[in-house]
Image (cartoon, rainbow, N blue to C red):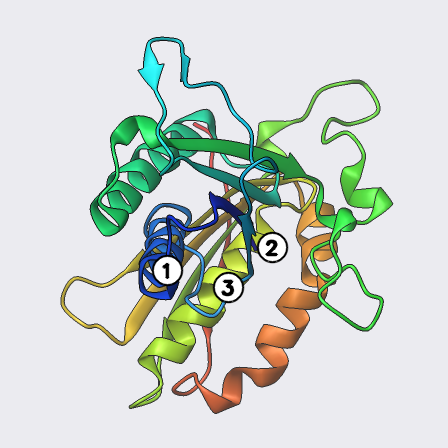
């Protein structure tokens, strides 16, 4: 759920050019962070001269009046590699869309815990409960790998509902990865069947799985699944077998 703030100088960006910058930002977020297309929140600031101040050069970079300051806030938890890939993708797409120098884009990424965001109704829809924020280690400060629980789930979209299922699954994955005790939560798409998806989930223990099932996003997905899932979600539970 990134929130993008785009800052530019007055007189340099007309509506057409701003629209291209806006689309480039969203396309980069969808491409790298795998957010659903309707996860779209942007604020565009156009400042008069004297209210948008910056150095003409820094760290060997040269800035012109086309300079863009882009601030992105999103829920914490993404890897360093993902954040670095996002910086490259943003620069490539915005430079191409706006016709600016690669130097003229400054990006600030800010991460916050899910409980810092409310999408309405006074609820923190992406919150991790106090229990889930607790240390993932047990009372002795470590976990027992043999207690891990594996979930394998096959999900097939109803005809004509492929895009909706994909959007719902991406929201589910983003929220689930924040839960306490979630070791792996990966989404896979069939190469042969565009309607078929596979979820691989690994939890530190059965207790952590039970906590995850109380996640409001998980409960909503399951409650609404009849409208976009063909049949039932095929869920299988496994334990780790040690020799």
| Residue topped by disc 3 | 40
Residue 230 higher or lower than 59, as above or below: below
Q: For residue 192, say whether it is visible.
A: yes
Of discs 2 and 1, which sits in the foreground? 1
| Residue topped by disc 2 | 175
The residue shown at (55%, 61%) is 41
Of discs 1 and 3, which sits in the foreground? 1
Residue 140 higher or lower than 13, as above or below: above
Q: Is the residue marked by circle 1 packed among few (<14), some (14-19), or many (20+) residues within 10 Å?
A: few
| Nearest to the observer: residue 185 or residue 117 | 117
- Mark 2 vs 1: CB contact within 8 A: no
Q: For residue 4, say whether it is visible.
A: no
Q: Earlier in the sequence, mark 2 or mark 3?
A: 3
Q: Secondary structure at mark 3?
A: loop
Question: Could you tell me how far apart the alpha carbons at marks 2 and 3 are, in whole angstroms?
Answer: 16 Å
Q: Position of residue 82 (x, y in %)?
A: 40, 34
Indicate the quadrant where residue 113 lies.
top right
């Amino acid at each position: 759920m990134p929130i993008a703030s785009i800052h530019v100088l007055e007189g340099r960006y007309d509506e057409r050019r701003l629209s291209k910058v806006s689309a480039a930002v969203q396309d980069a977020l969808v491409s790298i962070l795998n957010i659903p297309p309707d996860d779209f929140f942007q604020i565009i600031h156009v400042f008069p001269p004297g209210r948008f101040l910056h150095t003409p050069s820094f760290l060997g970079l040269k800035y012109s009046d086309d300079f863009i300051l882009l601030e992105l806030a999103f829920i914490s938890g993404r890897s360093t590699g993902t954040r670095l890939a996002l910086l490259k993708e943003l620069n490539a797409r915005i430079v191409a869309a706006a016709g600016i120098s690669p130097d003229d884009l400054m990006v600030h990424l800010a991460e916050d815990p899910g409980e810092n965001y409310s999408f309405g109704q006074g609820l923190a829809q992406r919150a991790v409960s106090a229990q889930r924020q607790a240390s993932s280690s047990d009372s002795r400060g470590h976990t027992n790998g043999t207690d891990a629980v594996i979930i394998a789930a096959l999900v097939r979209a109803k005809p004509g509902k492929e895009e909706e299922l994909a959007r719902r699954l991406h929201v589910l994955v983003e929220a689930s990865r924040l839960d306490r005790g979630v070791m792996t939560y990966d989404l896979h798409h069939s190469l042969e069947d565009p309607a078929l998806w596979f979820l691989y989930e690994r939890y530190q223990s059965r207790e952590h799985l039970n906590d995850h099932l109380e996640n409001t996003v998980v409960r909503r997905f399951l409650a609404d699944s009849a409208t976009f899932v063909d049949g039932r979600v095929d869920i299988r539970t496994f334990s780790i077998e040690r020799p």
